[in-house]
Amino acid sequence: MGDVSKMNIERIVTDGDLDGLLSAAILRRVWNAVPVRFSHPAEVRRGGVDDWMTRGTAVLDLPFHPMCGLHIDHHLTNKPTPAQQIAAAEDGCNIVWEDALSAARVCFNTFQESVNLDDIATWMEMVDKLDGGKISRQEFLSEHPIVWIGRTIDATDDIYCQTILQHIVDGVMPHDLVELPIVAEKIGHAKDEFRQLQAMLDECSNVVDRMAIVRLDDKGIRTNGYLVTAHFGDQCDACMIVHGYLDSDGDDEKWPLSASFYSNSFLHENGGLFDLTQLATAFDIDGGGHANACGCRIQPLSKSLQKEDRSVDANDIERNMDAWMLMWANRS
């Protein structure tokens, strides 16, 4: 593979969460001022970032794109085979994949000998914990600045994400970053939404067979599994969160109808009782992630739970959930 820091990287496409943002910040230390685009796995897979792809493009914390020049990731479902790595290298693309808690950790390990990342090291432990499902319930419910900065990151607010990115590249520490007016305001909104979600959970959730099922579809709210599993505690071993909009087609403000799956990492610190990627990939070829944290889009299914070639309708939510719960019921 050689020294990837010597590559001619001209642009970066990264996941629009805290892990993706830190990954981009590390690469911006190596390739100063190159443009960064925040994206998400579904957008990459449907060709939404094809216009950014050249051999000078680095793709971080996202699915592999065959036209990129550098791919850095840690997701199990994106792990390349040795043959795929060799084939990519022969075609002019370097793939860097590690079994790490975060993509930012893979970036940190890759470039720490090439550029000074001492200040970035301050971020790494908590980013690893948040992305790798290793955060404690006490830390999750704390006032830790990185926890709250992470809750403000939203890829749809590109100006804000670019601002946070530049501050981190410039070496601003987390405890100073939360004091900036733009960040303090966002954290205030995030705290209001956090309290709103906590209040909503009992109304839009139920626990079935130790799976906490949360219906946030068409509510305009998203959350990850930490809030859900912290709320239900030892009542659940995992959670399923349905979010997005049924009528999202053609509306950039509405994200697609999807589901996310998370193990209760507060209860199962070394991974869950079931590989949740089996649920995420059961019907959606673009689904995936980690065994303890993954997701997919709701798919059109027949009454017999077979995938159909049509648009998703309201009945498909229940059918997808029924199919996933059957798989969950057969866990060992």
Image (cartoon, rainbow, N blue to C red):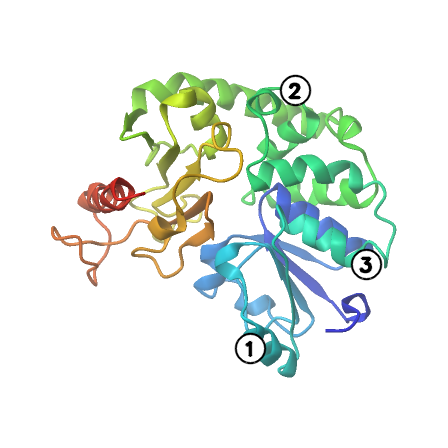
Query: Within the image, what quadrant is residue 156 found in?
Result: top right
Disc 2: which residue: 143
Front residue of 103/42: it is: 103
Disc 1: which residue: 83
- The reply to whether callout 1 and callout 3 are in contact (CB within 8 Å) is no
**Which residue is most to the front?**
332
Q: What is the secondary structure assignment of the residue under circle 2?
A: loop
Instruction: Point out residue 123 in the picture as x, y percentages from the top left corner.
Output: 74, 37
Q: Mark 2 belongs to which amino acid?
A: Glu
Instruction: Point out residue 234 in the picture as x, y percentages from the top left corner.
Output: 41, 22
At 38% across and 34% down in the image, what residue appears? 239
Q: Which quarter of the rendering shows the N terminus?
A: bottom right
Front residue of 73/244: it is: 73
Q: In this view, does 189 lie above or below 171?
A: above
Going from N to C along the chain, the mark reached first, 1 or 3, is: 3
Instruction: Point out residue 253 in the picture as x, y percentages from the top left corner.
Output: 44, 44
Disc 3: which residue: 30
Q: What is the secondary structure assignment of the residue under circle 1?
A: helix
At 53% across and 33% down in the image, what residue appears? 269
Going from N to C along the chain, the mark reached first, 2 or 1, is: 1
Report how far apart the C-alphas of labels 2 and 3 lie in the structure.
31 Å
Q: Which quarter of the rendering shows the C terminus?
A: top left
Q: Mark 1 belongs to which amino acid?
A: Ala
Q: How many labels does the image show?
A: 3
Report how far apart the C-alphas of labels 1 and 3 lie in the structure.
28 Å
Instruction: Point out residue 191 in the picture as x, y percentages from the top left corner.
Output: 56, 21
Query: Within the image, what quadrant is residue 12 found in?
Result: bottom right
